[in-house]
Image: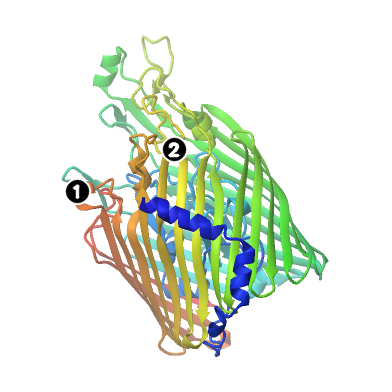
């Protein structure tokens, strides 16, 4: 009953007629607030991602968290996924059995083992993988030092970015080539085998600004897994090198072009995935990861009120996993064959190419639109996962319109139509009504719908392992097929009715700035209905066919507070409370997995203080409570508490050189494993030091 009451209230408020809102604000209801805070201390943030329009956060059709480069540097982050602990309602965990090389970043949680419901963009380019839908954070070829800011849309955003912008959207905006000139050399080292290097050169050649980065990274990951009471090695270390190039060329005042290219190669350590009672491993099952992308954008200003943008990119994600193995004698004898040896593999090659044109029109001071079309080709090639090659084409059209009724109301209407070869047609709408209580305070009422399209593996995949380089005597020379339990035929084929996962989201939120206090408030009340969820493991087990049938409801409250205590001291706090209801008759036995990355409560508290002109101290406390309760129902889930401290000091050198020294200590306060029993460290402390030369 409580959920129905909350839902009814949110729908009523979200769809309240604009005329009623206008009448209420036209009177004196909020007039008393106009003069409450006269001294302007904090600037009003602007964002780009929410509706593809440059908007004040007072006008956005979504709750947005913005994280700037200065905050990232002051709090000592070295891994991109860790940054999202600063976002209310966002959780950072790690896959069980795959460890630190496979982080899961989620807004409001849901399924941790196969988390695939969050869109991630880098300068508008999606890094969401098309074959095995996921975001591989450790393999993204981007240096954390190259990030200018991050915009996180906290809520469904398919109306703007299409399918898979399901729970939210992250847009990582990198530093523009024209922002700086010079060079940077940085080295980072610490325990757990942390060893990173970073070299950046930014300059101008003729009429082109460029920014070139070369880097490497290494870490060992979790220290051990638990096999009963025995500690075993958790092979999840990462070692990689990467390079990126970004350019900007201005041809005229109204025409410019941008290019980006990147390449990354690394080795991700891997625990064995096949049954060690049956298979004898002769070498590790490590993953060689190779990513490459090419991106271009043409910007054309047809007039001050008409701007076009043509973007295209192509990217390839190649994973080579090959290892020598033998079938153990007992298992071979049971099959009536002699012991074969050879090589297994689970190689895969995923490619995504996209073409998009968007056009922004300013029709008047009160009315703006952005509209466009997009074509995307997804390709997936893997004998192990897909029995060969498959592809999918997607054609989309979108529009977002912003209209202001004087200074009292801003409305945002948007939607995206998609035609997908594998998943048919779909339309995702969004409606937002922003009531401006005064120039610095707004109340939002938002209703949105979004989808997640099943990927190529979910729709058409089947999983087999073929032992190559050897034949089995007595079987006519046929290769040995290992099928995760179905030996001999060994195919786990996608079965069941697979369709889009859907979400219907209702939000009431507030954003405001208390000027004389230097404080920014962002509060959100939400009620989301998620349906058609695919909750089974992606092993494609015939006894557990994949089906789009599960349903859950999420409701709760979250917020963030930023406070400029003084010119030299900033405080920030986030908090989130989530309730999950999965008691619906159509749900299958796997629906508890949809709470494996969800926590009842989570939040953060950070402080950044400038101790002198050249010395900065940053501290952050993170807390997650009742996390992954389905895994540990007897103890009400896992707990996570960590305190980070970062001290930075800059030394000025001759010739405008500067040396920046930084040290970070992370201390785990609790005694739990991280989300799963298999994710463990020997020590509670994690420290690393860096030295950076700017020239």
Question: Secondary structure beneath disc 2?
Answer: loop
Decide: is 471 above or below 129.
Answer: above
Indicate whether 607 appears above or below 193: below
Q: Which is more toward the observer, 470 or 505?
A: 505
Answer whether residue 366 is visible to the viewer in this image: yes
Residue 611 relative to residue 653: left or right? left
* Viewer-nearest residue: 550 or 618: 550
What residue does disc 2 label?
534
Task: Point out residue 49 in the picture as x, y percentages from the top left corner.
Answer: 60, 62
Q: Is residue 107 visible to the viewer in this orientation of the structure?
A: no
Is residue 527 found left or right of 254 in the rendered image?
left
Looking at the picture, does residue 462 appear above or below residue 237?
above
Quadrant of the rendered structure where residue 35 is? bottom right
Give the residue displayed 25% in from the left and 49% down from the top. 677
Q: Residue at point 28% right, 26% down?
A: 278
Q: Which residue is mark 1?
A: 634
Image location of residue 283, percent across then percent down: 35, 37
Q: Secondary structure at mark 1?
A: helix
Q: Residue at x 33, y 32 (%)?
A: 274
The crowding category of the residue bearing disc 2, from other C-alpha atoms within 10 Å (few below 14, some 14 to 19, many at least 20), is many
In this rendering, the answer to whether 416 lies above or below 87 is above
Q: Mark 1 and mark 2 in contact? Answer it, CB < 8 Å.
A: no
Camera-side residue of 116 and 81? 116
Image quadrant holding the C terminus, namely bottom right
In this view of the protein, which residue sits in the foreground, 26 or 473?
A: 26
Q: Earlier in the sequence, mark 1 or mark 2?
A: 2
Image location (x, y in percent) of residue 529: 46, 48
- Please count the marks in the image: 2
Colour setup of the view? rainbow
State the image coordinates of residue 504 (x, y, percent, origin top left). Answer: 51, 49
Q: Quadrant of residue 87?
A: bottom left
Per the rendering, the mark at residue 151 is none
């Amino acid at each position: 009953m409580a959920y129905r009451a909350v839902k009814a209230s949110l729908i009523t408020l979200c769809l309240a007629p604009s005329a009623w809102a206008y009448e209420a604000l036209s009177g004196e209801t909020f007039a008393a607030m106009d003069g409450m805070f006269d001294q302007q201390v904090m600037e009003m943030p602007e964002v780009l991602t929410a509706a593809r329009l440059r908007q004040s956060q007072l006008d956005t059709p979504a709750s947005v968290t913005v994280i700037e480069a200065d905050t990232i540097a002051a709090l000592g982050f070295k891994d991109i996924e860790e940054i999202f602990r600063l976002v209310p309602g966002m959780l950072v965990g790690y896959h069980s059995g795959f460890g630190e090389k496979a982080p899961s970043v989620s807004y409001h949680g849901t399924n941790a083992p196969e988390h695939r419901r969050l869109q991630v963009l880098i300068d508008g380019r999606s890094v969401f993988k098309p074959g095995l839908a996921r975001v591989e954070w450790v393999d993204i070829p981007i240096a954390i030092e190259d990030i200018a800011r991050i915009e996180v849309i906290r809520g469904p955003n398919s109306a703007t970015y299409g399918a898979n912008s399901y729970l939210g959207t992250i847009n990582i905006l990198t530093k523009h080539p024209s922002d700086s000139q010079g060079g940077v050399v940085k080295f980072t080292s610490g325990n757990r085998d942390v060893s990173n290097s970073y070299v950046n050169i930014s300059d101008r050649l003729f009429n082109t600004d460029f920014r070139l980065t070369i880097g490497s990274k290494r870490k060992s990951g979790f220290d051990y897994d638990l096999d009963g009471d025995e500690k075993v090695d958790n092979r999840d270390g990462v070692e990689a090198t990467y390079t990126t190039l970004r350019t900007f060329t201005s041809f005229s005042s109204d025409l410019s072009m941008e290019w980006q290219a990147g390449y990354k190669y690394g080795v991700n350590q891997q625990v064995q995935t096949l049954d060690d009672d049956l298979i004898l491993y002769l070498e590790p099952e490590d993953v060689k990861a190779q990513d490459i992308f090419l991106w271009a954008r043409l910007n054309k200003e047809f007039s001050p009120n008409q701007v076009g943008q043509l973007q295209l990119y192509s990217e390839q994600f190649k994973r080579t996993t090959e290892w020598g193995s033998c079938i153990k004698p007992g298992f071979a004898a049971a099959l009536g064959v002699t012991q074969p040896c050879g090589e297994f593999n689970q190689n895969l090659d995923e490619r995504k190419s996209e073409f998009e044109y968007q056009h922004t029109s300013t029709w008047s001071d009160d009315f703006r639109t952005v509209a466009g079309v997009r074509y995307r080709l997804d390709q997936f090639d893997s004998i192990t996962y897909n029995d060969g090659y498959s592809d999918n084409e997607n054609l989309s059209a979108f529009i977002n319109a912003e209209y202001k009724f004087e200074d009292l109301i801003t409305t945002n209407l948007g939607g995206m139509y998609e035609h997908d070869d594998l998943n048919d047609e779909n339309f995702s709408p969004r409606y937002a009504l922003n009531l401006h209580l005064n120039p610095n305070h707004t109340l939002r009422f938002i209703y949105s719908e979004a989808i997640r399209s099943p990927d190529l593996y979910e729709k058409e995949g089947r999983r087999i392992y073929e032992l190559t380089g050897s034949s089995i005597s007595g079987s006519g020379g046929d290769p040995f097929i290992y099928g995760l339990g179905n030996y001999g035929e060994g195919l786990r084929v996608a079965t069941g009715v697979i369709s889009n996962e859907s979400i219907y989201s209702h939000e009431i939120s507030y954003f405001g700035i208390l000027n004389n206090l230097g404080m920014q408030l962002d509060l959100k009340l939400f009620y989301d209905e998620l349906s058609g969820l695919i909750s089974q493991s992606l092993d494609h087990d015939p006894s557990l066919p994949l089906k789009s049938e599960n349903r859950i409801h999420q409701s709760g409250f979250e917020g963030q507070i930023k406070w400029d205590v003084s010119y030299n001291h900033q405080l920030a706090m986030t908090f989130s409370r989530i309730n999950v209801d999965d008691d619906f008759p159509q749900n299958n036995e796997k629906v508890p997995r949809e709470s494996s990355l969800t926590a009842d409560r989570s939040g953060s508290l950070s402080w950044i203080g400038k101790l002198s002109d050249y010395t900065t101290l940053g501290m952050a406390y993170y807390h997650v409570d009742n996390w992954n309760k389905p895994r540990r129902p007897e103890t009400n889930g896992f707990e996570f508490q960590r305190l980070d401290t970062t001290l930075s000091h800059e030394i000025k050198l001759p010739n405008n050189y500067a040396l920046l020294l930084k040290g970070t200590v992370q201390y785990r306060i609790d005694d739990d494993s991280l989300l799963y029993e298999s994710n463990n460290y020997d020590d509670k402390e994690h420290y690393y030091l860096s030295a950076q030369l700017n020239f």
